[in-house]
Structures are given as structure tokens and as C-alpha cells.
Image (cartoon, rainbow, N blue to C red):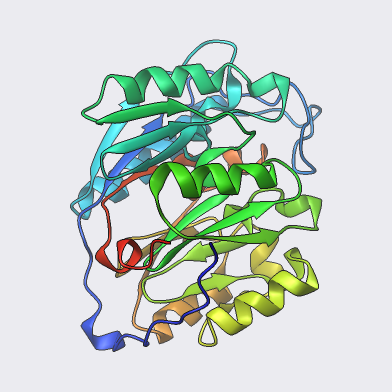
């Protein structure tokens, strides 16, 4: 199931943004009323007005660069529904809604499933295995990278591989601060950026072999969820606090777009957490299906 082939590096001068379709959810009900990761502190009040303004700035940043943004209706009583990336996976004409690990978020799965079912997918399924969508599944040009250790079951990796017919590479997360793959790794264009210490030794070595030209994030940038970003092939939307990572991206020919999501960081989420992508089927991936 796992592919270990590498892709040739792309000429930085040839980088171009590709229009994407994203799903977001307004933080109308966002709050920190429970703690299910180390970032959450119920004693630290949320400024919802500021959270809404920060979320809106991200939406405007996407649309201003040519991307389509759909918005799902938020549900009262689901304060973390703003983190749309966790709602499922959408690739080509198939979608798989999430099955959340924590009871506090369990009803988000049906909410996102309902949105998917209303779209033009040829197949929409509910996950059998516990998984939290793009929180733990990163769609790369030649494979799907999949995290496990805190939220998504390893069995979900096989389920995703079978449902989408794509190769999946399993990675073990070991630091509770980086409880989802998208907090420790970001797919760029022809490579990735990641924080090796978030992974087991075996997984870190595997990533190093798959992506010898990867950008290695500093601990400081990882600790502000700088890797929780979104790349459109040229622009990289990420936390404005990840200054070293932004400099590395610029040196590789990307254009970093800093976004302040400090209020949402109180729940352990940033740019990518707020963004589910409806991925097109990529020829490079499909050709490696086994």
C-alpha cells in the first residue's frame, strides 16, 4: 500500500497558484468549554468578535487570490465545528465524512456528512474507523500521508486507501501538542514542510527519505502551529507568527500569506484546521494506485 518513490523537485521560478475549492465554517459558536488537547484552557476566555474577524480575514485572503470558498452552516453546541478540515475527505467525486474520537465533537461528523451529501459527489460515505478528516490525512501529489497516535485509528488508513483507491503512507505522531498530522506537517507543491520531533523516529526517517528536500520547521514555528497551513502551489497561507518558516518558504519560491488566528489557536487550530479542500484527482496519485 505504501509508495516510497520521490518526485523531482520543481523549479521555484515555475511556481503558480492553482484555483482551489475550500469549505469553511464561521465561528459563530466558537468557544473553549472543554479541553481535549494541550492547547485548550477553559479558564482563558475567547473573544468571539475577534475570532469572527480573524476567520473572515482568512476567507477574504482565499477569495482574493482566486479560490472558491463554500461555507457550511455552523451548529449551536458544536464550538469546534469551525475547524472544517476535520469534517472529512473529499477527493474527485468521492467524499468520506469523519468519525470523531472525542464525544464532544461526535455530532460534527453528521453535520459535515449532510453538507457532503448535498454536493455533486458520486459517492458519499460515513467512516467506519475513527478518523478526523484532513486533520490526519494530507493529500500530496503522489500519495496520501496519514497520521495516527492521538485521534485517527490506524485502521482508518486502510479504509481511506480502499475507499479512494490511492496509496497511503502511515505516520506515527508522538507529541500531544501535535495531535493531528496537520499541526506537524504541511504539503506544499512538490515537497512538504514538517517538524520531525512530532513523529516517531521511524516515521521521521521515512519522511526524510520520501522528501529529502523538505523544509524543516523550527520548534518555535511548530509551537505557534505554523505548519497548520494551506498551499495553492504558490501562496502559502499560514500563521503570521511563523516568521522563520515564512522566510524558508520565500527562499523556495513560495509567497507566504501571514494570517492572525490567535483566537482560534486557543482551541489548537489555525489556517488548515479552518479549511477543508475539495481535492481534484491528481494524475500522479492515480498512476501509483495499488
131 relative to 170, above or below: above
Give the side of residue 168 with respect to residue 203, left or right.
left
Q: How many marks?
A: 0
The C terminus lies in which quarter of the figure? bottom left
Q: Quadrant of residue 35?
A: top right
230 or 288: nearer the viewer: 288
Question: Is residue 111 shown to the viewer in this render?
Answer: yes
- Residue that lies at the very extreme toward the front in this rendered image: 290
Which residue does the image show at 75% across and 45% down from the upper left? 150
Estimate the x, y position of residue 288 in percent, counting from the top left.
37, 67
Question: Is residue 26 shown to the viewer in this render?
Answer: no
Which residue does the image show at 20% across and 55% down from the upper left? 19
Give the side of residue 18 with respect to residue 199, left or right.
left
Q: Quadrant of residue 104?
A: top right
113 relative to 41, above or below: above
225 or 101: nearer the viewer: 101
Estimate the x, y position of residue 71 in percent, counting from the top left.
32, 28
- Residue that lies at the very extreme toward the top in this rendered image: 76
Which residue does the image show at 58% across and 48% down from the upper left? 157
Estimate the x, y position of residue 238 in percent, counting from the top left.
47, 59
Estimate the x, y position of residue 17 in percent, counting from the top left.
23, 66
Amino acid at each position: 500500500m505504501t509508495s516510497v518513490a520521490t518526485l523531482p523537485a520543481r523549479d521555484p521560478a515555475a511556481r503558480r497558484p492553482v484555483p482551489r475549492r475550500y469549505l469553511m465554517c464561521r465561528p459563530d459558536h466558537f468557544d473553549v468549554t472543554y479541553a481535549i488537547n494541550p492547547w485548550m484552557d477553559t479558564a482563558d476566555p475567547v473573544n468571539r468578535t475577534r475570532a469572527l474577524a480573524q476567520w473572515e480575514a482568512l476567507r477574504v485572503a482565499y477569495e482574493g487570490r482566486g479560490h472558491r470558498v463554500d461555507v457550511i452552516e455552523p451548529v449551536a453546541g458544536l464550538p469546534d465545528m469551525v475547524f472544517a478540515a476535520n469534517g472529512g475527505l473529499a477527493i474527485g467525486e468521492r467524499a468520506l465524512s469523519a468519525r470523531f474520537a472525542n464525544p464532544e465533537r461526535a455530532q460534527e461528523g453528521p453535520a459535515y456528512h449532510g453538507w457532503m451529501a448535498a454536493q455533486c459527489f458520486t459517492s458519499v460515505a460515513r467512516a467506519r474507523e475513527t478518523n478526523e478528516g484532513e486533520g490526519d490525512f494530507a493529500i500530496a501529489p503522489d500519495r496520501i500521508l496519514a497520521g495516527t497516535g492521538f485521534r485517527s485509528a490506524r485502521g482508518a488508513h486502510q479504509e481511506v486507501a480502499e475507499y479512494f483507491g490511492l496509496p497511503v503512507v502511515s505516520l506515527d505522531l508522538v507529541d500531544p501538542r501535535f495531535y493531528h498530522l496537520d499541526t506537524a506537517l504541511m504539503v506544499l507543491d512538490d515537497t512538504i514542510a514538517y517538524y520531525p520531533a512530532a513523529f516517531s523516529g521511524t516515521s521521521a526517517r521515512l519522511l526524510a527519505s520520501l522528501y529529502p528536500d523538505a523544509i524543516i520547521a523550527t520548534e518555535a514555528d511548530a509551537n505557534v502551529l505554523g505548519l497548520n497551513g494551506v498551499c495553492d502551489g504558490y501562496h502559502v497561507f499560514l500563521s503570521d507568527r511563523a516568521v522563520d518558516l515564512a522566510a524558508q518558504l520565500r527562499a523556495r519560491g513560495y509567497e507566504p500569506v501571514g494570517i492572525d488566528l490567535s483566537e482560534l489557536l486557543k482551541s489548537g487550530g489555525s489556517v488548515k484546521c479552518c479549511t477543508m479542500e475539495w481535492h481534484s484527482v491528481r494524475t500522479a496519485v492515480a498512476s501509483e494506485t495499488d
